[in-house]
Amino acid sequence: MKPIYGGIEAGGTKFVCMAASGPDEIIAETRFPTTQPGETIQKAVDFFAPFLQRGELKAIGIGSFGPVDLDPASPTYGYITTTPKPGWAQTDLRGGILRAFDLPVAFETDVNAAAIGEHSWTPENSRFDPFLYVTVGTGIGVGVIANGRPLHGLVHPEMGHFPLPHDWRRDPFPGVCPYHGDCFEGLATGPSMKARWGQPAETLPDDHPGWDLEAEYIALGLVDMIYAYSPMRIVLGGGVAQHPGLHERIRGKVLRILNGYVRSPAILERIDDYIIPPTLGGRSGVLGAIALAIKLLGKKP
Ligand code: ADP
Ligand code: ZN
């Protein structure tokens, strides 16, 4: 009997649960909206219960929206902490899963899990370290793999809240971040595009000036990340980044903003292979959670 692992991608909008041994051996998968914590965690528990009863389930990994507490020595380890999402502040997400199953449970940020997913399950990515996973969707988040491990720290990196240069004449929009107004998330998420232009990002035509502005903000964010982490590769995903042609525009602007300062052929000659879309489609996070569960048992995904 092949061991099965559980993956949970806990998002602010939806939860994705998967039972699998890897991307090519997905046994079951489900998605449901994120409602109240008790009800939502119970749905995840119900999904995994049959695999536990059959003795197949060996460990569970969680990649969660945050901020989260990643410090195993902290009394609130595994909690979602100060989120403005109603009902979810101080939610013991890891504890809820642990108490239901009594199995090893790995806990990470959603974006670190997605970075692990892209890094572990895609052989072409595995050799790149440091490695970044960036999502631009409902929010903006960045997962960092450094020295083979997801980077934590005081809390965890929060690059979605980078302050960015904001030309108020070109873009008089004040931004939507409840903490900072016109930070990276405030200016460049799907919801900020919708608020600025009065229509969802997916309905903005290709030639709308909003796309050039969007590419500019994402490129500025990526350039800051390139200076800070010197990543060997950046995976850029999320709903907004799916817009056709946006990757190309962003790459061009990254080159222009860097202005030749970072003298690496990976950027100067092969940027198409440096900033790339996710290889696991919409499953980077949940497959990363599976990889975290496998790693927790000391095995290699
Ligand atoms: P989440 O961030 O909640 O996990 P997504 O990454 O799918 O989910 O991001 C959702 C956001 O992306 C929404 O604001 C939506 O308007 C925007 N979006 C989704 N698809 C596209 C698209 N094809 N082009 C532009 N924006 C999109
Ligand atoms: Zn902010």
Image: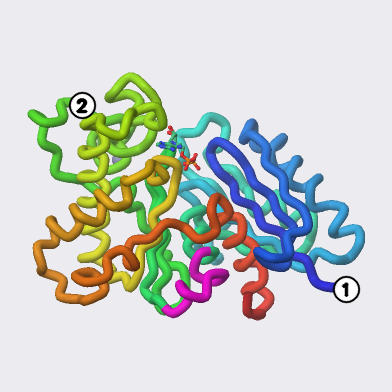
Q: Is residue 155 magenta?
A: no
Q: Which mark is residue 1?
A: 1
Q: Mark 2 points at which residue?
A: 173
From this viewpoint, which residue is outermost toward the right?
A: 54
Quadrant occupied by the C terminus: bottom right
Q: Where is residue 225 in the image (x, y as percent from the top left)?
A: 26, 60
SS at badge 1: loop
Residue 91 quadrant: top right
Q: Residues within 10 Å of mark 2 (few under 14, many from 20)?
A: some
Which region of the structure is painted magenta?
118-127
**Left or right of 176 in this view: 113:** right
Q: Between 271 and 169, which is closer to the camera in this rendering?
A: 271
Q: Between 245 and 140, which is closer to the camera in this rendering?
A: 245
The residue located at (44%, 46%) in the rendering is 238
Q: In this view, does 150 lie above or below 189?
A: below
Q: Is residue 298 above or below residue 45?
A: below
**Left or right of 224 in this view: 108:** right
Q: Position of residue 227 (x, y in %)?
A: 20, 65
Quadrant occupied by the N terminus: bottom right
The residue located at (63%, 48%) in the rendering is 93
Residue 53 seen in this snapshot: yes
Residue 216 quadrant: top left
Q: Between 86 and 53, which is closer to the camera in this rendering?
A: 53
Sequence-first disc among 1 and 2: 1
